[in-house]
Image (cartoon, rainbow, N blue to C red):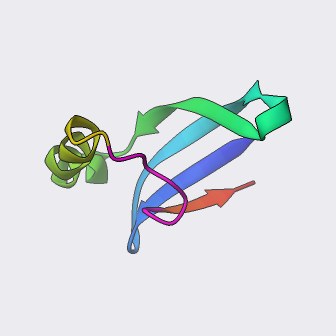
Amino acid sequence: MKGYLYIENDWIGKIEFEVMDESMGAIWGDLIPTDSYEKYQSAIRQHFELKVFLTSKTFNIELR
């Protein structure tokens, strides 16, 4: 499954999702960033350093 990651209206990357834990409905994937990713990179790293989990409510993730 492909996912397209947006922050507001900026497309920041594409993700090729794979099932991580089917019983829990968990998926994972590597982000393939676009050029727009750079302007959000430091904010995204801060979220991870604070151990805040990113969800579809944090960013606009469009699955196809």
Relative to 63, say whether 33 is above or below.
above
Q: Residue at x 47, y 34 (%)?
A: 31
- 63 sits to left or right of 25: left
Q: Residue at x 50, y 66 (%)?
A: 57
Quarter of the image with the N terminus in it? top right
Residue 5 position within the rendered picture, expressed as x and y whole percent measured from the top left? 49, 54
Q: Nearer the viewer, residue 44 or 52?
A: 52
In magenta segment, residue 23? no
Toward which corner of the image does residue 27 lie, by quadrant?
top right
- 61 sits to left or right of 31: right
Which range of residues does the magenta coloring cover? 52-59
In magenta segment, residue 53? yes
Relative to 12, say whether 59 is above or below.
below
Q: Residue at x 83, y 31 (%)?
A: 22
Q: Residue at x 18, y 45 (%)?
A: 46
Q: How many marks are shown on the rendered structure? A: 0
Relative to 44, say whether 48 is above or below.
above
Q: Which secondary structure dominates the residues rendered in magenta?
A: loop
Residue farthest toward the bottom in the current orientation of the protein: 9
- 12 sits to left or right of 48: right
Residue 32 position within the rendered picture, expressed as x and y whole percent measured from the top left? 45, 34
Toward which corner of the image does residue 64 lie, by quadrant?
bottom right
Relative to 34, say whether 60 is above or below.
below
Residue 28 position within the rendered picture, expressed as x and y whole percent measured from the top left? 61, 32
